[in-house]
Image: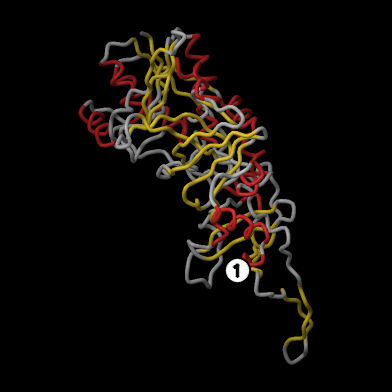
């Protein structure tokens, strides 16, 4: 079988190519350049050139053909523009997820197919299985990688059955340590190369600087919400009462549980006062015991729910987190402490057009429900939850409240394979959090 390996210059894709060649496949490598602009990046301008050089050395070592393809225009249109659009709306996108769906297993695959490839392989830590459905046609499933610490199935949560039919994940059964060992034994140039960080194919970036290429930064205010605020919050108290009542929940009740607090009633008021020997007139923010001014910050679109770093808010015993953002008013709402009530929610909502089933044969119809395990961010341990399909979309209700549910990120649901003691999980679908 002729297989094209997306060779990035990293150790994972290098070992993927190594294993496929050892298995006797007709293997060729292709390096894809997806980004050229270094604005906002925290590395040298030519990092992609260095990665390409390493990838080419790996291909030479493995004695397989090496090619280069420039997909930067496709990447800009289908990944970066999506990023800017989401951030402009106050949502937090996941470019790595979109890169896999739109670039690696679409644009890249189309180029590989024209070069004669039957399949395309990547260095993802996940597993693919195939079986026959009731109609006799093949059905593909994605399982978590054997290395729980490196499982990357989350990033493949938007793939389709058609894309999976042409995908190969050679290192899914291996641990990172085993991958490193195989690379060293084969004397691959990438054996000790550090894992890449940051945005897929862009690298590690200073996010505000990167986003300011298209989004203007207008300085705004940060508002600290004090825990006593929630005693008078009608929505918070209704949600608390519903959770105390317990399931079953009506469609309206699920909608209420999934509604995030928007702090629309919170506003900053100022007052004038005289200060000093000369009674200079000054202005200060009025404190009301429910919230208080916490400083001036970058525009609200540059912050994300659950964010801790980069706030620059001192004078607290515990860390301060972003609770919510209001792009229209250019406000960032924050709270102190890991147990701040504003950080936690029990449910989330996914719009109908954002629901994606990797296994369409298991898709729920309106009125249906399904116990699943869910993660709302990469590397989060799986959380027990239940899917509820309604006419207006899908609701996910968690057994335990979740910290930092972030609009724009993907909620990904899994089903356990086998009995209750099994640690095998299949990824069934995903949806962007509203």
Given residues 176 and 324, the one toward you in this image is: 324
Given residues 247 and 349, the one toward you in this image is: 247
Left or right: 256 in relation to 185: right
Q: Quadrant of residue 264?
A: bottom right
Q: Inspect this view and state whether residue 153 appears.
A: yes
Given residues 151 and 390, the one toward you in this image is: 390
Residue at (43, 12) in percent of width and height:
138
Above or below, 116 relative to 302: above
Residue at (68, 41) in percent of width and height:
214
Q: Position of residue 225 (x, y in %)?
A: 62, 65
Left or right: 248 in relation to 278: left
Q: Quadrant of residue 124?
A: top left
The secondary structure type at the circle numbered 1 is loop
Q: Inspect this view and state whether residue 104 appears.
A: no
Within-10-Å neighbours for mark 1: few <14, some 14–19, many 20+? some
Given residues 156 and 283, the one toward you in this image is: 156
Query: To which residue does mark 1 refer?
Result: 226
- The quarter of the image holding the C terminus is top right
Q: Position of residue 212 (x, y in %)?
A: 65, 46
């Amino acid at each position: 079988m002729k297989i094209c390996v997306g060779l990035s210059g990293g150790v994972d894709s290098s070992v993927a190519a190594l294993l496929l060649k050892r298995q006797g496949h007709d293997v060729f490598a292709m390096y894809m350049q997806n980004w050229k602009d270094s604005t906002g990046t925290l590395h040298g301008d030519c990092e992609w050139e260095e990665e390409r050089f390493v990838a080419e050395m790996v291909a030479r070592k493995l004695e397989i053909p090496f090619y280069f393809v420039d997909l930067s225009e496709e990447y800009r249109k289908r990944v970066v523009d999506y990023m800017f659009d989401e951030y402009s709306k106050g949502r937090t996108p996941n470019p790595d997820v979109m890169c896999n769906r739109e670039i690696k297993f679409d644009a890249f695959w189309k180029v590989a197919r024209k070069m004669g490839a039957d399949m395309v392989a990547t260095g993802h830590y996940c597993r693919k299985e195939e079986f026959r459905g009731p109609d006799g046609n093949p059905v593909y499933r994605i399982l978590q990688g054997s290395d729980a610490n490196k499982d990357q199935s989350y990033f493949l949560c938007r793939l389709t059955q058609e894309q999976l039919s042409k995908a190969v994940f050679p290192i899914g059964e291996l641990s990172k340590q085993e991958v490193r060992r195989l690379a060293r034994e084969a004397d691959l140039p990438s054996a000790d190369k550090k894992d890449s960080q940051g945005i897929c194919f862009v690298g590690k970036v200073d996010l505000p600087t990167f986003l300011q290429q298209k989004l203007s930064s207008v300085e705004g205010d940060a508002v600290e919400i004090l825990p006593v605020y929630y005693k008078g919050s009608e929505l918070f108290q209704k949600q608390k009462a519903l959770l105390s009542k317990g399931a079953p929940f009506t469609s309206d009740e699920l909608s209420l549980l999934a509604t995030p607090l928007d702090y629309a009633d919170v506003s900053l008021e100022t007052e004038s006062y005289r200060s000093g020997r000369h009674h200079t007139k000054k202005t200060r923010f009025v404190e009301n015991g429910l919230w208080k001014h916490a400083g001036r910050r970058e525009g609200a679109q540059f912050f994300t729910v659950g964010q801790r770093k980069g706030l620059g808010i001192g004078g607290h015993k515990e860390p301060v987190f972003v609770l919510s953002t209001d792009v229209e008013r250019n406000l960032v709402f924050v709270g102190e402490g890991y147990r701040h009530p504003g950080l936690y929610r029990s449910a989330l909502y996914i719009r109908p057009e954002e629901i994606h089933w990797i296994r369409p044969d298991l898709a729920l119809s309106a009125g249906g429900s399904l116990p699943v395990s869910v993660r709302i961010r990469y590397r989060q341990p799986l959380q027990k939850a239940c899917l509820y399909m309604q006419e207006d979309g899908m609701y996910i209700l968690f057994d335990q409240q979740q910290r930092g549910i972030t609009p724009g990120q993907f909620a990904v649901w899994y089903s356990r394979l086998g009995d209750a003691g099994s640690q095998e999980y299949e990824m069934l679908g995903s949806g962007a959090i509203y």
